Image (cartoon, grey):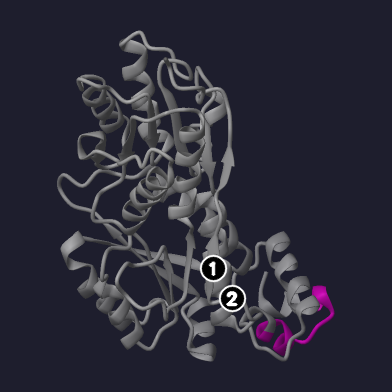
Amino acid sequence: MNLKQLSELLGLSQTTVSRALNGYPEVNAETRQRVLDAVRKTGYRPNRAAQRLATGRAGSIGLVMPTADGHDSDVHFGEFLAGLGDEAVRHDFHFVINPSHPDDEEATCRRLVASGNVDALFIAYMRVNDPRIALLKSLSIPFLVHGRSIGTPLDYPFLDIDNTAAFHDATKLLVQLGHRRIALLNGPEHLAFAIRRKKGVERALAEAEAGLTLKETCVQHSAMTDEHGYRGMQRFLALAERPTAVLCSSTVLALGAVRALNQAGLKIGSDVSLIAHDDVLPMLKPENFSVPLTTTRSSLRTAGSRIAKRLISRILNLETLPEQELWKAELIVRASTGPAPR
């Protein structure tokens, strides 16, 4: 099917169909949606080269993917990409994924923008005083940050969850259940989300009547993998005073933690309570664990879809959406948390 046939099918001029596909603001939302629905049903694909000449847009979102020897692959990133794809396919947008060594991300961003192959950039894995923010603000291209840096003014577009509040609320639940020795299996210590989650735990413990503290021996920072969860829990259990409750920054870490607890013959929810952050990974549902996990929940796929929606809306001038969003995670109590053992 070509543009002429598509316009005849819809009873619209070729100019109107082209303008609808290219995001011109004078085409109303109802007409644009009719065109997009027809595109999906007919399999029509516009000529990318002609479209780019006409609009100056590439129809692509750029992502920099950190990768290097010894850099663990991340199932969370895959789920986030699925969410981006859910929204991008609705508007016939593509991804340009540029792998980069973690130490070379700024140069990679520059090259990606200079190539002219992307209309906007998305970055994640935010750090303290993250230099990529200043870089992106200096480039003439829309961008969006998943997460927030620490020590950098919040004058850039972002979408994040309130990690501090999520782990504060989870820790507060454990304190209310009588737990005094609480441990944390966290993400990498240089990443902002992990710093904020630790801060949430520390804040809730400090607010307790007994003025509790989070001991450094009860904290592990690592990549969020099953193996790191297993080893971290083994180390906690070997302490002279082992923790009676453990918070995990991911259900993937919790998977390893549960394996270590089972091997030690400890019962989850009575001997040791467990809370994990649930990114709503389809292959790792907390309710399907041998003991259903209490979780703080916020869907990575939904976040990915929202980020794509915001970027595409900005590129195509479709609608005005918030520049900054801070989502609250939901605390869901299941059987993995119980009163502290006496």
Looking at the image, the residue that sits furthest to the right is 11
Q: Nearer the viewer, residue 195 or 47?
A: 195
Q: Which residue is drawn at 56% across and 22% down?
A: 335
Give the residue at mark 2.
322
Q: Residue 100: percent from the left, percent from the top?
A: 23, 62
- Residue 60, position in %: x, y? 46, 72
Q: How many marks?
A: 2
Q: Can residue 257 be seen in this view?
A: yes
Disc sitting over residue 22 in the figure = none
Q: Which of 257 and 5 is in front in this view?
A: 257
Residue 336 higher or lower than 86, as above or below: above
Asked if the residues shown at circle 2 and circle 1 are in contact, with their CB atoms under 8 angstroms apart, the answer is: yes
- Name the amino acid type tagged 2: Pro
Residue 90 is drawn in which quadrant? bottom right
Query: Type of residue at label 1?
Result: Glu
Q: Residue 325 carries which label?
A: 1
Which of the pair 208/197 is nearer the observer? Answer: 208
Q: Which residues are the magenta region? A: 8-19
Residue 216 x %, y %: 21, 40
Is 132 placed above or below 201 here?
below
Q: In which quarter of the image is the N terminus?
A: bottom right
Question: Could you tell me which residue is drawn at 68 percent across and 62 percent down?
Answer: 40
